[in-house]
Structure formats: structure tokens, C-alpha cells
Image: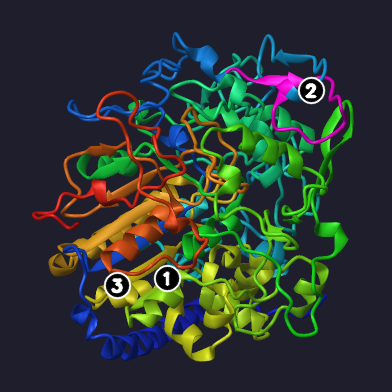
Amino acid sequence: MQHKTIITASLFTAMMAAGLSAADDEGKHDRDRHEHRHHVATRTPIKHVIVLIGENRTFDHIFATYQPRHHESIQNLLSRGIVNADGSPGPNHDLARQFKVGNINPVAYFVSTDKLTAPNKAAYAPFLPTPEAGGAPPVAVTLAQLQKDPAVAAPPFDANTFSLNELGVITQGLETQDLHLITTGATGLTNCTSDSTEPPSACPEPDNRIANFLSLPNTVFPLTGQSLPYDSYTGDMVHRFFHMWQQSDCDVAHATHANPAGCRNDLYPFVGISRGDDSGSNSMGFYNMQKGDAPLLKRLADKYAMSDNFHQSVMGGTAVQHIMLGTADAIFWEPFGMLPAQPPAKVIADPTPKSASDAGFVIDGRFTKCGDDAQPGITPIKAYLKSLPWRPDLTATTCEPGRYYMINNTRPGFLSNGQINTDGITAGTAMPPSSLRTIGDALNEKKITWGYFGGGYNAATRFDNGSKDPVDVLIGTGGDWYCDICNPFQYSASIMGDPAQRQEHIKDVVDFFDELDHGHLRAVSYVKPDSFDDGHPASSKLDIFEAMTEKILHKLEQHPELFAETAFIITFDEGGGYWDSGFFQPLDFFGDGPRIPLIVVSPFSKGGRISHTYTDHVSIVKFIERNWELKPLTHRSRDNLPNPITPHAGNPYVPVNMPALGDLFDMFEFSHDED
């Protein structure tokens, strides 16, 4: 076995001291260069935007039973009668009923079961499939186990063998008093690692902590209960591009005034089970705020402004959502030097079912040549889009001929140290540097300060530079704990490929907290927790994400002069495969997808207001552009779409001028007209 540095408390402490000292020096250097920040005019009193992005939770999954202040309305599981306040099935529980398909005829990819011949589509009866552990950790990892094989170690960390100093070096997104959260919440289920000296791993098995896990009615169900407290790791599930389109089961024949897209969202467990992802009915679980779940998010929704019509921008998972956050567009494979001119065939998706009785895909790939209708899986989506009255197939962001678009998680072409990931690009697990224009480029042109602050970035950089320290190996291996696919600017040749740009704009969360501690914020700050703190099912917990959110709030409130001119936007990258009852608007081939939470904390966003305006991740780009008077990023990017027009009476959730995206301005109340 390759020699690995042994972690000791003194080594952790030395690393922590060195890291903080370097951050102090770097932060002072940055602050000296950014004293001019107030010289840049804005259209509103907002001079700073912080965007905090968690992971993999739909709106209904968190806000299922939220009750707004008396003057506000909301669309969630409780308001629609799908559940009662105690989490039990409500009078309209059948709105969440799920189905399985017994016969796929023809044997081809489908997005509507109506297009199949004799599909034998039947509701799960008498119960849902059992929810599964889905990769959630069975027991805590010990210090010795992490030292032996840090590349496969995962939280929680054993409180008996890790000190607070050691935990504080592993993740720097939490206050000291909250570090205990990364030591608790293991499932207590079977450990599939037979060697007790190696890090534990989850077995594929039912999650018996969920009440009535063997007899769940065919509808949504509460996750938490006596055996599964809120502070628990829970199972993951499928959240990939072609899978999510298929789960949505969309057909214009089922369009209604409230749901003009005609998406029934009734194949969620079926598609995951067909993929073999050890998830069962996990997609149907929700938290219950009426019983104390997600207390911070509830408190912020009560006090500030929230949207119940904000969406993930793309069907599928993490990387494509963050790309939209940074570029308002979909990213594609570009020729770069002597590297392959297109992705290898093994990573090009072919979602054709394996057989008439097996909906699993022939190739569950990362890319699609969606400008070519002859490619597998393309025609069903495009035919559906063409059938919609607002013709999203004609939107500028549709697929261009000859391009292979990324649709599932693929690492950036740049490593964290700025070197080209040649091996990854050749294998198709990473993509070449991109020329796609980013919001960072637009801000640079106007000399507006900005930064992307990614948890674990410094450790990942050390790992890419050859460090064998177990913490660096843990965080840097495979882009897992520092989330490189979450950094849209790490794909960008103009940012990540320029050492000066990289040093100026790509930072660790420790740098964000250092700047904030010293009373300074850049105009735009994207803050991405490491994967310990981001709230992702199986690898993190929602209460950990709340703790990091509260740390930012606490530090921001310590500087009233900053808080007075800051919009702190709290959202998630995507729904993670959880079910949601809300309407989503097909904008183009790529999405939108289900609703996700968005809260705006600001002195101008108070009172528990709930916005019903249709928005998605690109709306954050549109807010930045409108506030700092920037133009759309390119001629085809989604930030060119108009703001929604909604009728004065009727359905506020569905724009009459689709395709349309809001710019979040209605979530603020400024003292004068900013138009």
C-alpha cells in the first residue's frame, strides 16, 4: 500500500493554523484591491448578492406542510390536500399516486406512457415499494479507518476518535458548536464492509427506520419519526437527465389550466427501480415542518421572502444545474488542442430500454447529440415539446447540430490547480475547457467584483498538486467532497485557464468567511458548501446545511452596514429525484425540472412574503444583470427570455407568455421604482 501521512491532532491543528494564516494574508490582499466596490452603480440598494447553493431537495420535500402567514398563499402538499398537517395522507392523496409499466412497446425511450401500446401501466398496490438505505452510512468512520483509506471514507466521523480540531479541518463551513452534526445520524443498518479496519459502506436494504416501511400507502410519506429523527442520514435516488424526463410522464393530452405541460409525475419509483439504484420509494419522502423539521428554513420563510415557483433549470443532476447558474445555457464538448474532438462512444447516452420488460437504459451516458433527431432518446422529447402551444422546441437554447451536450455529471476539464485533466477528458469522465461565456466574464468586463467560494477547494488543490495527506485525499479524490462539478467557472477556459483570474475569483469557503469577518463582501459571491455540509441525501443532512446557512447569517448580521445592502439567496441545485406537486415549464430540450426552494434574506425582503412568479436558476443571473445593468450573456442564453406575465385573476403560477422566466425583483420591496 502506498505510504500515507498519519493524521494527528497536532498535524490537523498545524494545517488549520497555516490555512487560516494564509487566508488572512490572501483576504487582506483581496480587500486592499476591492475598496472601490461601492463605486459601481446598481439599480437598487442591493450592492452585494450572496448565493448559497445546497443539494438535492425539492420544494415539497422540505416545505410539504409549511403554513405561511395569514396574508400569504402557498402551493404545497398540505394546501393541495395531498397530506394532512400531521403528515398522514390527505383527502387528495391520489394526486401523488405512482405507477409501474409492465410492457414497453415499442422497445424505445419514452417520455409519455400514452405513446406505448398496451403498456400494462398499473398503480403500485397495495403498497409502495419499500424505501431503501440508498447509500446512507450505516456507522461512523473512525480516525484509523480514514487514515487507512481516505479515498473511500465518508461521514459521519466517529466522535470518540476525532477531535473538534480535526473535524474543523475536514470541514470549515460550520461553527465549532455545530461540528457534532458531522458525527451523528448514521442509519445503524448493515455495514457491508467486512474488514473492520476499512471505512464502512452501506448495504442495499430497506430502510426500516421509516415508520410502516413495509406498508406505505401509494402516495407521499413522512421521512422522520420515532426511529428516524431529523438529524439522520437518509437514502439517495436517481436524478439523471433522461430518467427525470421519463419520471415526469408528460403528454399534452393531459394538460390542464393549472398544469399546461401535462406532466403527471407518476413514474418516480419505477424509473429508479428500473435503473437498479437501491432507492425503492425514497423519492416520495418528505420532511414535516409541522413537527419541527427544517426549523431554520421555516424561520427564514416566516421572516423574509420565499418562492413557491422556483425550479431547477435542467432535468437531471448537479453539474448541469450549476452550469446554468453560471452561464444561463447548456454546455457542450468542444475541441481543445490534441484532445479528442468528441466524447468516447461509451459515455454517449442511449436511453433505449434493455427489453420490453426492462426499462433500464442501454447506455446511461453523460452526453447526447441532441441536435440529431436520429440519436436515441431525442425524438420523444422533441415531439412532446413541439406539441406544446408555446413551442419550447424553438427556444434559442435548444440543441445545435453536431454538438454533444453534457446531460449528466461530468467533471471539468481543469483540475483544481488549473492543470488540464487530460486523462479524464480522454476517458470521457471530464470535458474539455469551455468557451461558453459566464456571468463571471460579464462581471469582469464591468469591473464588478465577484468570487466563487467552494468548500474544500484548497484541499483539492493540494491533492491535485500531489499531497498525500489523508484530509486532502479524502476531499480531493474524484471531485467528491470538494464539488468540482458544482463550480461552473472551473469548466471555463477564460476563468480557470487564466492563472490571474483563477487566483482572483476561485476561492475556498474559508476565504469567504475571512472576508466577511473583516466586514467585506464582493458584489457577487457564489458560496458552495463542501459535500459534508451541502445537505445532499446519503452524504450529508439537511440540518448540516441549515447550520452552515446560520453561520453565514450570523456573520452577516454582525456587520449591519453590509446586511443593509445585501441579498442573501438560499437555494438548492436540484430536486435530487424527490417528487414535487408543482407545475414546471418546459423551456427547451434540457428543462426546466421540478420546483426547488428559494429564500431571499434581505432588509427589502421581509414579512414572510411568498412569490408565485415563475423562476429558475437563470433568474439569479437575470437579477444580477438587471441590478448591475448587464446585457444577456449571449444571443441564445436563457437570460434573454422575458419576465412572466400573469393574469390579475386566475393562476399566478403559469405565465401567459411562455416561455418566460422572472428576475426575482418581485421578491423585494424597494422604496422607489427601480424600473
Residue 362 percent across, percent down from the top left: 87, 44
> Please, what is the three-letter code of the amino acid marked with disc 2?
Leu
Residue 354 percent across, percent down from the top left: 89, 36
Q: Is residue 462 magenta?
A: no
* Residue at the spot of label 3: 523
Query: Between 388 and 620, which is closer to the camera in this rendering?
Result: 388
Q: Is residue 104 above or below residue 470?
A: above
Residue 627 in view of the camera: yes
Residue at 65% across, 39% down: 244
Q: Is residue 87 above or below residue 589?
A: above
Q: Is residue 396 above or below residue 574?
A: below
Regarding mark 2 in the picture, which secondary structure is present there?
A: loop
Distance between the Cα atoms at labels 1 and 3?
16 Å
Quadrant occupied by the N terminus: bottom right
Please tell me in which quadrant of the rendered image residue 537 appears.
Answer: top right
Instruction: Kindly indicate whether the residue at mark 1 contacts the one at mark 2 (C-beta within 8 angstroms).
Output: no
Instruction: Kindly indicate whether the residue at mark 3 contacts the one at mark 1 (C-beta within 8 angstroms).
Output: no
Residue 223 in view of the camera: no
Is 122 displayed left or right of 605 in the figure?
right
* Residue at the spot of label 1: 509
Query: Between 35 and 195, which is closer to the camera in this rendering?
Result: 35
- Which range of residues does the magenta coloring cover? 97-114
Checking the image for residue 321, the label placed there is none
Residue at 8% across, 54% down: 671
Distance between the Cα atoms at labels 2 and 1?
49 Å
Is 37 displayed left or right of 362 in the figure?
left
* Residue at the spot of label 2: 116
Regarding mark 1 in the picture, which secondary structure is present there?
A: helix
Give the farthest residue toward the left.
Answer: 671
Instruction: Kindly indicate whether the residue at mark 2 contacts the one at mark 3 (C-beta within 8 angstroms).
Output: no
> Please, what is the three-letter code of the amino acid marked with disc 1?
Val
